[in-house]
Amino acid sequence: MINAVKIVWEQILYFPLIIRMVKYGDQSTYQNFFLGQAWKIINPILQVSVYFVIFGLGLRNMGQGGSPWKYAAWMMLGMGSWRFMNEAILSGSQSIKKQIGLVSKMKFPLSVLPSISIASAIWTLLALGALSTVFIYMSGGSINSRWPWIVYYFIAAVCLSYSFSLLNSTIVILIPDYISILRLVMSMGMWLAGVIFKIDTLDNVIGDILRLSPFYYVVYGMRDSWLENDYMFQAHFQTGTVIFWSVVLLFLIIGSFLHLKFKKNFMEYM
């Protein structure tokens, strides 16, 4: 637990550095593009639009039914939440391995590298969240009165992404093949988290298992607070909250222990 507290304190202490590194990374990545950093917003919107055409217009009865714009709002916010965590976890899990040379030239702890990856992925959530808001008004609806709760679920998404990334970042260095397994698991996560189809329609054992997922907790929590009340999610909120934060704490404790135990030897495994 002491290791976890130390890691968390490093994130707070070096937060200004994390923000500066994100700005530098974005400028470096998009400096040769005509539209520049606008691609951080355009890219996720174009990709998710394909899912909307297929599932919102072509297979609408499998989504919300009724107005395609209501389904678009529902799907866009879920997709934004999922893609944010997916990008943050995959990028954060490889951040130390890819940038350890940079750290050797600058004085800051390795533990902040996953945080830099997470901060860089926030634009995906903001872009798709804004588009979701536009669609909910186009469908004749409005933002839920419980909207302040979305701040809580955003913090939950960040905590889950960081704790899981920290754990994975050490394992990836020790076991290089692990990243292939992680990509496979995360590729299935979008479907298991109910981003496209409503898990609430699965009133059986499979649905009960899927509702225990920490990704389901964030995705459906975002929707419940921003779009409309999800009474099935609210019925499982207490149980889901206990499970979610237990998983996050477990990832953080184990990840912190492994990180501090092996960080002095990372270069030997590269």
Image: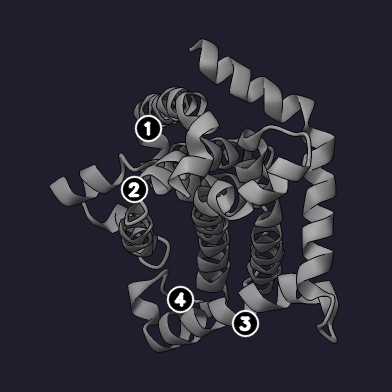
Q: CA distance from mark 1 to mark 2?
A: 31 Å
Q: Residues within 10 Å of mark 3 (few under 14, many from 20)?
A: few
Which residue was labeled with disc 1?
240
> Going 46% across and 30% down the picture, which residue do you hit?
262
Amino acid type, label 1: Gly
Which residue was labeled with disc 3?
46
Which residue was labeled with disc 2?
175
Q: CA distance from mark 1 to mark 4?
A: 29 Å
Disc 2 element: loop
Disc 4 element: loop
As drawn, the residue found furthest toward the left would be: 205
Give x and y (percent) for residue 219: 48, 51
First along the sequence among labels 2 and 4: 4
**Badges 2 and 4: C-beta atoms under 8 Å apart?**
no
Q: CA distance from mark 2 to mark 3?
A: 35 Å
Amino acid type, label 2: Ile
First along the sequence among labels 1 and 2: 2
Q: CA distance from mark 2 to mark 4?
A: 48 Å
Give x and y (percent) for residue 242: 39, 24
Can the viewer see residue 206? yes
